Image (cartoon, helix red, strand yellow):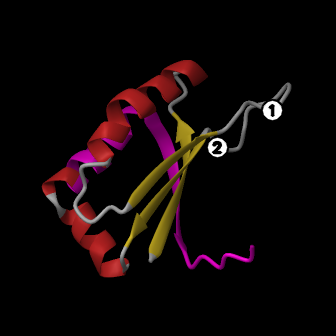
Amino acid sequence: MFKLIILLKKKPNLSDEEFTKYWLETHAPLAKKMPGLRRYVVNVVRRPPSREPDCNGVVELWFDDVDSMKKAFASPEGRATQKDTETFAGSLTTLYIDEHAIT
């Protein structure tokens, strides 16, 4: 199993609520249509007291392997998902993860 984690920073013109609503109600249903996607988890970052968070959300995407991930993002659904990300995310940090469960 291969995991991709993406840290998202919202566009500055969106409130925290607008960012979350768009991500959960519009973007997530689009993303979950990508072929080969085994699991999709949205993590919304809570605003710390008195400052802007370093990122506003973290998404976890699971695939069978790296090739499956590449095919998913190259598909029409994957391209649409990537294009839609530009609607609500101002910046992204992408991490390729080898997970080691300890417990």
What residue type is disc 2 on? Cys
| Horizontal side, residue 96 vs residue 39: left or right | right
The magenta span reads 78-103
Extreme-left residue of the structure: 76
Residue 22: say if magenta. Answer: no
x, y percentage for residue 54? 70, 44
| Neighbourhood count class around disc 1 (C-alpha, 10 Å): few under 14, some 14–19, many 20 upward | few
Q: Quadrant of the N terminus?
A: bottom left
Q: Measuring 49% from the left and 39% from the top, which residue is drawn there?
A: 90
Can residue 87 be seen in this snapshot? yes
Dot 2 corresponds to which residue? 55
| Most foreground residue, 11 or 99 | 99
| Badge 1 element | loop
Residue 48 disc label = 1
- Determine which of the numbered discs, if any, sits on residue 84 in the image: none
Report x, y in % for residue 99.
60, 76
Q: Is residue 95 left or right of residue 80?
A: right
